[in-house]
Amino acid sequence: MPDRRQHRGPHPQDQRLFAESCEQLLAVATNELSWLLSRGYAIPSSLKLVGDRHALTARQRLAISRSACSEESRQVRGQRRIDSIDLRQSELWIDGYNVLVSVEAALGGGVILHGQDGCYRDMASMHGSYRHVEETVPAIEQIGKQLARWHIGRCRWLLDRPVSNSGRLKTLFAKIAQQYGWDWQVELVADPDPILANCEHIVASADSQILDRAGRWFNLAREVIDLQTPKAWVLNLGVGRFPPNS
């Protein structure tokens, strides 16, 4: 069936699966999964063990898998994360879909996961196809205006060429950037991950594979959501939320 969604909003079951009454359980499960990852256990078997223990649904398991990380990864990512003051007159390379969809989801009322490494991640799934929604233009404008407030030098957005409608999104980015006078370059690439992971400039992404390798990174989606959408539905599964054995 064609995708007729007009919003990047919550899944129909999210109100039940991620209700306030479930938050502590999910935070405990995330801590347990992170504990196993810290000791070298593989994610598939660890996720099954934790998920089965707490009788989590597939969507809840997806949430904790996106939120967990090993202690080593958490520390490395924290050491390489920069602050907004460091963006002034710098060049920022952005993981386009990764950042944009999270901000869209926040605007649309979707669940935003606060992970163990401090990043915000969404629960949306594109399945190789991107669809323009009502939150798309506001999200791009929010990101751009916030970057302008930080006096960013130049932005290079990388979009996955294999994802359908990437060309149309590139055109939209260029149109909005021209309207506001932002120095943006938008590129379609086969796979942004290796480019960003080895980039000499500051990168913006919440992709774990990128964050574990990038030299310097900025928590762009979280910063924009916190500043521009303070009432976003943020599910806090981060470090210190609950004791591991509570």
Image: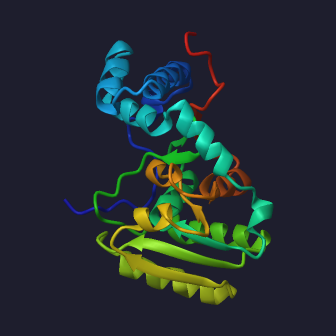
Instruction: Locate residue 47: give its quadrant.
Output: top left
Identity of the residue drawn at 47% across and 52% down? 207
Out of 82 and 131, give the one closest to the viewer.
Answer: 82
Out of 213 and 4, give the one closest to the viewer.
Answer: 213
Identity of the residue drawn at 46% across and 51% down? 9
Percent of width and height locating residue 170: 45, 81
**Left or right of 112, for residue 159:** left
Identity of the residue drawn at 56% across and 25% down? 20
Query: Can residue 144 be seen at all in this image of the molecule?
Result: yes
Percent of width and height locating residue 86: 77, 63
Quick check: 171 above or below 226? below
Percent of width and height locating residue 1: 19, 59
Instruction: Locate residue 223: give its quadrant.
Output: bottom right
Query: Can residue 115 be seen at all in this image of the molecule?
Result: no
**Left or right of 26, for residue 221:** right
Percent of width and height locating residue 38: 48, 27
Q: Quadrant of the C terminus?
A: top right
Identity of the residue drawn at 70% across and 50% down? 226
Out of 229 and 147, give the one closest to the viewer.
Answer: 147
Quick check: 153 above or below 55? below
